[in-house]
Image: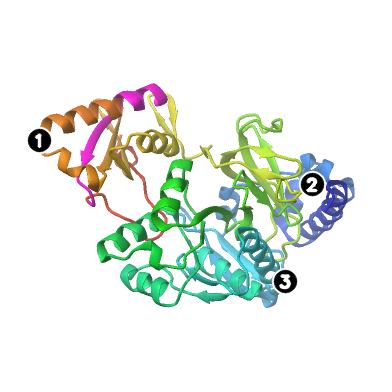
Amino acid sequence: MPIEERRALQGKRLQKIVSYVYHNVPFYRNKMQQMDIQPSDIRSVDDIKYLPFTTKQDLRDNYPFGLQAAPQSEIIRVHASSGTTGNPTIVGYTRKDIEIWSECMARCLTSYGVTRDDIFSVAYGYGLFTGGLGVHYGVENLGATVIPASTGNTEKHIRLIRDLGITGIACTPSYALHLAEVMEKMGIDIKDLKLRFGAFGAEPWTEKMRAEIQDKLGIKAYNLYGLSEIMGPCVSYECICQRGSHINEDHYYPELIDPNTLKSVREGETGELVFTTLTKEGMPLLRYRTRDLTTLHSGLCDCGRTSIKMGKIMGRSDDMLIIRGINVFPSQVESVLLSIPECAPHYRLIVDRIDNLDTLTVQVELRPECFGQFDTIEPINDLEKKVSSKLKSVLSIIAKTQVKAPGTIERSQGKSCFVEDRRNSLTD
């Protein structure tokens, strides 16, 4: 769609959704009245800057159904966030919401090259988490065959990949690498598989991690982005060019703001990603602060799509680690570790407070093929010093490094938990 035509569509949909939430969600009506805003004040998508922001705390404060706009009789499904603190985020979906979600997910799969002739395995968790059912409905909408593998029982899953001729897979990037590890232990050659592509998301990953997944599974690895508050997986997706993720902006309007000033940042600059749902009925949100830090880029893509693209998620504006006044993101640590040939892409960050000083310990596994070279303490010490030195140059803080044997850091079959912040358990 030409950009001007899409902006006109976005403007019409924004006007409609603002009026809808004003008359159906007391939270938004009160917010807008406090700001002296009427739905009639929103005439085009440029007027979005006048609308109030929404935060995750707002959703928790209005738990469970305070932000729901549609009557309960219209809600046919409920999902919840996987948050670990406070009230969970409850999201209700109408039948139209599910249809739009399925269509947007089908767009994502089509951009990877999936057709109705493919067999697609969904290895995200099924349940309150949106990953499993979100991708599942998209595969069915497209007409391909879906295998609802979910998580767990990895060896059985691998046998199905081989025996059923599965061509595509959706899961977290860390689970994709876990699959590759188990395949190797089972003696399965990727040349005997029909896998061609994978849709990976739900956790941060780097280009080096993508290269490793593509090499070990023999596939093209594509990014898939979404969040339950906005819809689920399908908010943005990579195309075959693999240079940024196209946003389904006719349904989810994106903005980038400075998380401190809340002002818009210029295109190409890093900012916090904000979404407004333009067509959602169950729980539409205005200017939802995702806390994800990224960049936005407009212009025609080589694939022919005109939709705006978002870059990789570079961290978060809320749960980034602040260690001795320095902002540290796990993705920065991962980039360093994957630049060192001896280090595997399995790590854990342990943050602690000792003698009133914050400390960072980075545990990282050796690659199995390098394990034999580290049979004495001296080469291990040398590698730990090398990793610590590189981390200091990138993070500007001193991090203690612990090199672990292959397979000793706990694996996750869902979202990986890379950080253990022990400061949260300390008492005053």
Residue 244 quadrant: top right
Q: Nearer the viewer, mark 3 or mark 1?
A: 1
Q: Nearer the viewer, residue 376 or 81?
A: 376
Q: Marks 3 and 1, Cα distance to the nearest angstrom? A: 62 Å
Q: Which mark is residue 96?
A: 3
Q: Position of residue 425 (x, y in %)?
A: 30, 42
Q: Is residue 201 left or right of residue 302?
A: left
Q: Marks 2 and 3, Cα distance to the nearest angstrom? A: 29 Å
Q: Nearer the viewer, mark 2 or mark 3?
A: 3
Q: At x 64% / y 43%, what residue is drawn?
A: 310
Q: Which residues are magenta?
A: 389-407
Task: Assess whether residue 401 is covered by the magenta stretch.
Answer: yes
Q: Is residue 35 left or right of residue 372?
A: right
Q: Which mark is residue 33?
A: 2
Q: At x 72% / y 68%, what residue is drawn?
A: 70
Q: At x 28% / y 41%, what residue is drawn?
A: 364
